Image (cartoon, rainbow, N blue to C red):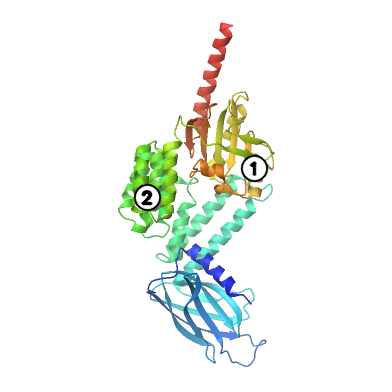
Amino acid sequence: MRSIHSIATFLFVASVVSLTACGGGDYPVESTVSGSFSVRAEIDSTGSYAGFRVSVLGQRDGDVDTLGTALTAEDGSFAFEVRAPEAGIYPISVERNGTELALGEFVAVDQDTVTVSAVFPLGARRLRIVSTENAAWMAYRNAKTQHNQSMAEVIGPGQYTPEMVERIITQTSAILWNIQNTYDGTIGGNLAKAESIIMLEGWNDSLVVARYPSVSSENESVVEVARAARRSLARLEGGSAALDLLTSLMDSVPDDKRAGIMAEMIVAYADSNMSAEAVEVASNLRRDYPDSPWAEWAVRATYDLENLQPGMEVPAFDLIDREGNQLTSSGLMDYFIVLEFYDPLEPIYQREFAKRNYLADALPAQLFRYVSVSVEADEAINEALFEEQDHPGFFVWSADGLAAHVVRDFNVHVIPTRFLIDPDGRLVAKYTGPALDDLESDLISIINSYNQLAEQLSQQQ
């Protein structure tokens, strides 16, 4: 038997997954639920199916809130109304005589009619929840489960290749896109549409840009989709086109999404070296949406713009690499440092990895140190890079992942991001996304200048 604490935990997870915030205010969403339960004859041959309690649950002020409930009649039938604060995904529980028999996911939308049935004991089966919304949600969940299983298989020992990851992403994206075609306008369909676009960014930018206009500004994931589209469009057509996309979107998104779009505009301006414009948008975001989660991020963005610009002294760092070497900003003085933030599964980094290795290996040891910091917290995923061969440079990661101090101090929000730091600890340049060619060009200039100076000194002696 599950305790009320396990139900509350399930409620929290479901609310995060479905982007539904329970509790408070009126409960305007009304769904009609009916159905029947029975028991397998070899378990109970009495034919009496009374006493099953079915409940749809929510959260209010941190407590479990019953949104609708009913007891079955003698023949196992039941009917009740669900009243929810918002359309979304909620737990549905079935119990009898104090024992919980089933816990599933129920999609609540206004004016929906849902049928629920089951024959107990369920075994490995689930509650049968029949409605278009619930069918769309299960299709979405099944596609995501299969995707996660496939990804887990390819990152196993000796199996990972970028081509395999790309194949899985392309396949899952196609499945999700078909789900949204079949269940257009449903919660599951809208999520499937958004994720079919988001996961393609960096793998198929042209398809991202082509699909993006089909996403409604009312879609719960519109900010995430806009972020993927902005990055894809920037790679294909440049920063100006990407900024135009965000500017046009500001006029159409709901007010609760504008702070997220403004945050993406800050990044877009910064990526286009338009610091003054980025700082202005950050100031506006903090003023207009002080209670938004983006407001705190805007403070960090402003710090980046005002403190992590070329010529400025970079934040101090103290790192331990995978081989136990201590790497400190003070200990690396007198060297040029390439400080690279990466994710081993990020498609851009995967495509650039061979060239990254070539550059790191070619850099003169008397001039450079190449330090790579992973934002992936899983040690197994990080170590997968080294299963067949070692790679030049110092590799660093920790269980803190994106929350690691060095990641936060350098305000990394695009992967990969690279910083070129001079021997005095000052920033030379920052490179975000697929900018390895720009880094290479700057490194060659430094090496050429050093060689010319060395030749001049040699001639003077």
* Residue 205 placement, left or right of 119: left
- Within 10 angstroms of label 2, few (less than 14), some, or many (20 or more) residues? some
How many neighbours does mark 1 have within 10 angstroms: few (below 14), some (14-19), or many (20 or more)?
Answer: some
Task: Say which residue appears at 45% left-offset and 53% top-offset.
Answer: 197
Residue at horizontal 45%, vertical 45%?
300
Name the quarter where the C terminus is drawn. top right
* Above or below, comparing residue 436 to residue 102 in the picture: above
- Residue 387: image location, x then y, percent: 69, 43
Q: Nearer the viewer, residue 67 or 331?
A: 331
Q: Which amino acid type is shown beneath numbered disc 1? A: Leu
Q: How many marks?
A: 2
Residue 212: image x %, image y %? Answer: 39, 52
Q: Position of residue 195 (x, y in %)?
A: 47, 56
According to the image, label 2 marks what residue? 286
Circle 2: element type: helix
Left or right, 100 with respect to 189, comes to right
State whether residue 210 appears in this view.
Answer: yes
The image quadrant that residue 273 belongs to is: top left
The quarter of the displayed image where residue 391 is located: top right
Q: Judge whether residue 237 can be spotted in this image.
A: no
For the N terminus, the image quarter is bottom right
Tell me the kind of residue under disc 2.
Arg
Q: Nearer the viewer, residue 35 or 329?
A: 329
Q: Is residue 66 above or below residue 332?
A: below
Q: Could you tell me which residue is drawn at 49 percent across and 67 percent down?
A: 137
Q: Which residue is mark 1?
A: 385
Q: Secondary structure at mark 1?
A: helix
Say whether residue 30 is left or right of residue 358.
left
- Place of residue 382 in the rendered image (x, y in percent of width and height, measured from the top left): 63, 45
Q: CA distance from mark 1 to mark 2?
A: 40 Å
Of mark 1 and mark 2, the one earlier in the sequence is 2
